[in-house]
Image (cartoon, rainbow, N blue to C red):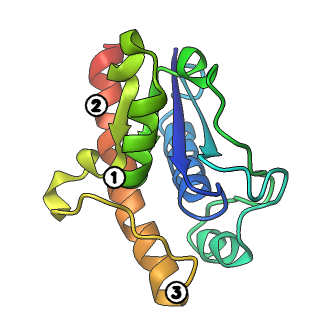
């Protein structure tokens, strides 16, 4: 069993989008019994709130259901709970790396490392943008999620 946690700032745009896309991919590939996923924020601004309505709407158009997700805040225990803590941008990666116990720092990764063909290092925050920004996030998250799943398949074999 592999447990994956996606992390952004408030857990209402990028990380729930990554969670929803990755979960759908895992389920479609019949791996839900072997890979679980969740998301959290580095800050507790939105604890208990659903994802941003724009994130929900754009994801729904592509067949992903984010409506049942609720924002949570990263906890120190998450480094033990999850095998991979995947940051949406460099700031989140730095935050996770500082917080991780020394023996668990290897569990921290950057989401865009799983889509090197894009030449991007970060998932941009669509919160202050428009529809095109939410669509762009979905485009790159779909590619990174596929790369992540391919990497986890290799580990599970």
CA distance for labels 1 and 2: 21 Å
Q: Quadrant of residue 61?
A: bottom right
* Mark found first going from the N terminus, 3 or 2: 3
Question: Few, some or many C-alpha atoms within 10 Å of disc 3 (few <14, some 14-19, many ≥20)?
Answer: few
Q: Please tell me whether mark 2 sits on a helix, a strand or a loop.
A: helix
Pair 3/1: label in front: 1
For disc 1, the marked residue is 90
- Expressed as whole percent of the image width and height from the top left, the position of residue 59 reads 60, 69
- Expressed as whole percent of the image width and height from the top left, the position of residue 103 reads 38, 9
CB contact under 8 Å: marks 3 and 2: no
- Residue at 64% across, 57% down: 10
| Of residues 121 and 145, the one drawn nearer to the viewer in this rendering | 121
| Of residues 90 and 14, the one drawn nearer to the viewer in this rendering | 90
Q: Where is 122 relative to 149, above or below? A: below
Which mark, residue 113? Answer: none
Q: Where is 114 relative to 151, above or below? A: below
Q: Where is 85 relative to 114, above or below? A: above
| Of residues 27 and 94, the one drawn nearer to the viewer in this rendering | 94
For disc 2, the marked residue is 151
Q: Please tell me whether mark 3 sits on a helix, a strand or a loop.
A: loop
Which mark, residue 129? Answer: 3
**As drawn, is 77 to the left or to the right of 3?**
right
**As drawn, is 52 to the left or to the right of 149?**
right
* Mark found first going from the N terminus, 3 or 1: 1
Q: Quadrant of residue 124?
A: bottom left
């Amino acid at each position: 069993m592999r447990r994956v946690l996606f992390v952004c700032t408030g857990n209402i745009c990028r990380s729930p989008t990554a969670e929803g896309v990755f979960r759908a991919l895992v389920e479609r590939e019949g791996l839900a019994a072997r890979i679980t996923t969740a998301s959290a924020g580095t800050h507790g601004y939105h604890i208990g709130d659903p994802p941003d309505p724009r994130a929900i709407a754009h994801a729904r158009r592509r067949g992903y259901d984010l409506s049942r997700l609720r924002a949570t805040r990263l906890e120190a225990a998450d480094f033990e709970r999850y095998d991979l803590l995947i940051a949406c941008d460099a700031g989140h990666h730095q935050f996770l790396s500082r917080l991780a116990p020394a023996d668990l720092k290897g569990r921290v990764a950057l989401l865009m490392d799983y889509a090197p063909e894009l030449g991007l290092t970060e998932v941009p925050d669509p919160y202050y943008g428009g529809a095109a920004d939410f669509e762009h996030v979905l485009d790159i998250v779909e590619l990174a999620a596929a790369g992540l799943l391919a990497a986890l398949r290799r580990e599970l074999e």
